[in-house]
Amino acid sequence: MVNALKEVSTSELVLLIEKQEIKIIDVRPVDAYNGWQLQNEARGGHIKNARSLPVKLMTYIDWIEMVRNKQILPEHHIIVYGYNAVDSGKVATRLLKSGYDHVSVYNWFVKEWTENPELPMQHLNRFQQLVPALWLNMLISGDHPPYIKNDKYVVVHAHYRNRDAYLSGHIPGAIDMDTLAIEAPETWNRRSPQELKKALEEHGITAETTVVMYGKFMSPDSKDPFPGSAAGDIGAFRCAFILMYAGVRDVRVLNGGFQSWQDEEYEISYIDEPKKPVSEFGASIPVHPEFAVDMPEVMQIIASNGSELVCVRSWPEYIGEVSGYNYIEKKGRIPGAIFAGCGSDAYHMENYRNFDHTSREYHEIAENWIKSGITSDKHLAFYCGTGWRGSEAWFNAWLMGWPRVSVYDGGWFEWSNDPDNPIETGVPEIHNSVF
């Protein structure tokens, strides 16, 4: 069937790339799309204007819905490319069977497109900080992966009061970090500089240590007493945010978390790795206070035309149908906050993830934000209930190179606990969300 597909040449694609009716689809892993040169191609990234549709995701039952959500429609002329003709052929054939009549393949991406610096490509601004499992496996195997020169690194398995998530299987050599070590349960805010210094030193982390964070998705249920204990995948972004705020210079997140490691069938360890404390963190915490904002600054953000408060919560939380948490009573949102969505509830991030828990195509995230009025020219403060989801959205914006992005650490928990703070409920009169 692959041989029967219409092929597009490099010269033809150059002429088609800017046409609105053309949809170019990249079926390589999203890490390659972001910028990683997974097969030693001359340049990393993707063809300009291409959309990410990894062949791996075809195994999921809702695949065609994902295609349509990307606004890739049957009336479009589609050009599919990947690392090889087999993968592009699989996706092209599936599209043809799904009612897409105008489908072609481009099989010269590696040999011609990446080799020619005059042909336009794009990549995620800070793609090196969102790492593939292949890169991490090279690191822990001593194989000197690209984009790192530091031999001092720590791999950290994040969890919330759930060491069983770590002990039931983790990446070899990884230590565990309970989020309680760096955020206080009384407020769910980041801990004090003194407490952060002590916690990081106990985990063997200095300002010069490369830290690779990941967590494990364990199907959290909001009806459980501690749903966050099953959402270590989001906890990893929360830890990354706090470490970067504190001053760890090189923080990476494993794209897709433990799921990506499993999908590659790499070795899994069950050893309870001892932490190796250090005597001195090596910087005055916080090195990046601008990454976090608190209630006084939030008041200023709400009043400013050059700033936006961004709500990273589910729609029922945003309009006040539910609080989202079994320990938060009040329902609603902070007045003026723009809805950026998260997913189905307080413990899921479907709006920011692919089916396999890797981060969604960054163009797609940015486009959805922009359609909702969230733009990179403003100071953006992301908030959720207690900081986890806001931290993941913040990390995405930071990866894209958006210049002024922060997390409102107190979130809905802090705001709703102050009886003097106003609360909005219902659908806003002007609602532009595309989520």
Image (spheres, rainbow, N blue to C red):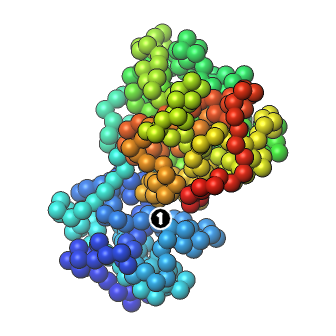
Q: In the rendered view of the protein, which quadrant contains the N terminus?
A: bottom left
Give residue 116's position: percent from left, percent from top.
18, 63
| Count of numbered tags | 1
107 shown above or below 318: below
84 or 271, which lies in front?
Answer: 84
Give residue 215's position: percent from left, percent from top.
60, 40
40 shown above or below 103: above
Tell me what residue is drawn at x 76 percent, y 41 percent: 331
Give residue 351's position: percent from left, percent from top.
58, 55
Q: Along the horizontal axis of the image, is 224 left or right of 45?
A: right
Give residue 338's position: percent from left, percent from top.
57, 47
Q: Residues within 10 Å of mark 1 (few under 14, many from 20)?
A: many
Residue, disc 1 = 54
171 shown above or below 210: below
424 or 164, which lies in front?
Answer: 424
Q: Give residue 353's quadrant in the image.
A: bottom right
Q: In the rendered view of the protein, which quadrant contains the C terminus?
A: bottom right
Q: In terms of secondary structure, where does tag 1 sit?
A: loop
- Badge 1 amino acid: Pro
Tell me what residue is drawn at x 47 percent, y 65 percent: 54
Tell me what residue is drawn at x 46 percent, y 88 percent: 101
318 or 196, which lies in front?
Answer: 318
Q: Is residue 401 visible?
A: yes
Q: Along the horizontal axis of the image, is 344 left or right of 100?
A: right
Q: Is residue 270 visible?
A: no
Tell me what residue is drawn at x 39 percent, y 22 percent: 208
